[in-house]
Image (cartoon, coloured by chain):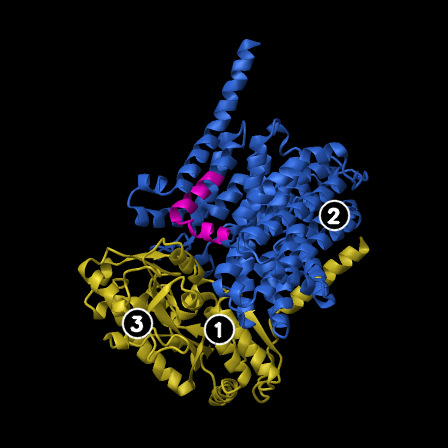
Chain colours: A yellow, B blue
Amino acid sequence: MRKFFGIMLLLLVMVIAGCSSDEKAGGEASFPSDNIEIIAPATPGGGWDATARSMQKVFSDNGIIEENMNVVNKPGGGGEVGWQYLKKQDAHHIAINSSLVITNNILGQSELTHKDFTPLAILTTEWNAVTVAPDSKFETGAEIMEQLKKDPTSLKIAVAPSLGNDDHLSFVQAAQEFGVDVTKLQFMIYESGGDVLTAMLGGHVDVATSSVSEFKEQHLAGKVKMVAVTSEKPIKGLEDIPTWKEQGVDMVFPHWRGVMGPPDMTEEEIAYWDDKIGKLVETDAWKEILKNNEWESYYMDSTETKKFLEEQTKKYEELLNVSGLTE
Amino acid sequence: MGVDYQYVIEGFITAIQPANILWVIIGGFLGTVVGMLPGLGPATAVAVLIPVTFGMEPTSALILMAAIYYGAMYGGSRSSILLNTPGDGSAIAAAFDGYPMTKKGQAGQALTISAIASLIGGLFAIIGFIILAKPLAAFALKFGPAEYFLLFLFTLSAIVSLSIGNMVKGFISMSIGLILSTVGVDLQSGVHRFTFNIPQLSEGIDFLIVIIGIYAVGEVFYNYMSLDRIKKEKKKVGTKWITKEQWKQSKWPIIRNGPIGFLIGVLPGAGGSIASMLSYTTEKQLSKHPEKFGKGAIEGLAAPESSNNAASVGAFIPLLTMGVPGSGTTAVILGAVVMLGLKPGPLLFENNPEMVWTLVDSMFIGNIFLVILNILLVGLLVRILDTPPKILYPLILVLAFIGTYTLSYSVIDFYILVIFGVIGLMMKLLNFPVAPLILAIIVGSDMEQSFRKSLVAHDSFVNVLVASPVTIALVILTILSICYPFFIGWLRRRKQSRA
């Protein structure tokens, strides 16, 4: 019995030690003076978590950052919980973000915008794809849009996990370019990209829009048919899939992920992260991770990121408006 | 049949390499431990181990993660049986009859039969995997929103109608569960329902917190009410060897429910929790003496235990054949596997068949190891019951809070935990059945979303009901299970009037 309690106690101590937040250091010493914390505002298993854990691994394995590093998961509210938490931390804490840091606010689901934080970098992007069943009569994205133009309610479109995200809006933007009445489109919202794929494979929906990585294996195996991608140039390994640009729509739609720090960071702290992240994206280990995850490098430093986020905000405001999600 | 037996055998040879056996043992042991601790489940354990797996052989990493997963199926029921606090979602059903067995002084036998049932269920599923993986994956795909909606409806109707003599209370309990399951963002419309501007609530109330609250915390509260009255008598734990009579009673339930659990596990989105609940209700309906269920019927323990372990093996079918995770834990495993450069999906069987079969064969070894481990542990575990309540209950509370925190690292969950502890206490005092509430919370949100998607897909409610042979079968099963208690009541009245 003693032994059993001994093990329990040990586990307990370990868990508590793992969870306790770092003590704040004096602040006079040069940055960084404390452990580094990378915040994944989601549960383990998704893209945000994978990005955070990959950063941690490459930073420490390649000796880019010597300090101790932890990944903390703060899931909830589409990033809201994690970012609220970040807002109260110092520059030793950085959080993963994506377009949700912009759209949550426009959709009225959050008070926070990217302006409440210090943009540090954009790291990666995925591209979105439109997919149909392998025996579908549609061969291109344009054909789908032509049909939707005639009758916007005639096709069931699977998307996850919510309206107003990139998977949804990239489809809306393409449809709008074709003159489809986008407010009438019939979306079925699934919980995850995996569920969208399952629904597509089972023939429960006509069209699916999700990230390329979600569909790639199935496309190569001939189980689904990709008919359009949102990238600038055809995607490596999927050269036969036409981009929307090649189908006559002037649209490139990245599904990017970046990092940001708490508000009011000093010049020195921003420079530190620019330097470290700049090194990170050059490593082979990082490139290997991108390849395994079907991510593409989309690196921008802190200055470019700031400008990029401004442009993105305008784009999303307009798109959410036409899709009928905001007034 | 496209089974290549050569690969099955080659996989076995790889699986019995010392390094891989070591990973199976480590994973199985870790899984058993995290399974026992309420709240700390296999998903968390796998997530914590992701950085460790980075440097590993992909096959070994998969073997390790899978072993944690089914190891937890063995471990989860330990705490259900001994303390009435399920270690994991899929171990709830083990508390229904496992804990009453402990109270009757049969803790040792309960632990043994649950380990044996898990083993047999697991072996069934492994054989099922080897023979049926591909056709089953194709069948699972045919489950659209209409099928899911009716499957969930059937599960709920079965559990409510089984609260025999207590149907009204069972119905109230289920309704509360359904109401609670509406908290959070509604996927179809994006509306925040009952979240009161608390972002942590936007993803709904995690059913694991509800389980820990109602069982662990509620049980502790309940025992505190009578703490001073508990006598210092040494509780009987009995032998760990099951009798011939007990084996006879559990044999068929174990054999029947292995395949049921396996099939439920294959369906993406359903998992061990639903499988074990459904098995429990099936067994109760088939039983000649359903009134013994809930009072320590050994078949009521054996059935769900066989089922949930079979489901954990079945869940690997959609993961490996389609790259679609069938449960929370397999979702985390998928993430980890992708980081290793593997792409689960239709091409995995063609490009890396030896890896798939090594994994499946390692499950075989792992299950045999786990049953030995768990039977050896019986002697040690039953001593928990000797712990003075004044030490044991605070310890359970501590574990409950830690487990809750690890779910989403949020202190708001502590309040929810305590609230459900109080609800659990009230339900116990007022004699409300808990199972319908828990099941409603587990399936409620998925059921509602499936229903609304099925309406978009099939235009009208009637079309949803007759969408496919599967939906028609499910409708009939649902009607039968609702009529069942009325039929039994009618039979009984007729008997009485004749007498």
Amino acid type shown at disc 2: Lys
**What residue lies at 51% left-to-right and 42% top-to-bottom?**
B437
Label 1 element class: helix
**What residue lies at 53% left-to-right and 56% top-to-bottom?**
B2
Label 2 element class: helix
Q: CA distance from mark 2 to mark 1?
A: 51 Å
Of B153 and A37, which appears nearest the observer?
B153
Give the percent coordinates (x, y) of residue A285.
55, 82
- What chain does mark 1 sit on? A
Q: Which residue is mark 2?
A: B390
Q: Which residues are magenta?
A: B135-155
Give the percent coordinates (x, y) of residue B28.
69, 58
Amino acid type shown at disc 3: Tyr
Looking at the rendered image, the quarter that the C terminus of chain A falls into is: bottom left
Residue B422 at least partly seen: no
Specify the principal SS of the magenta part.
helix
Q: Is residue B384 magenta?
A: no
Q: Is residue B180 above or below residue B9?
A: above
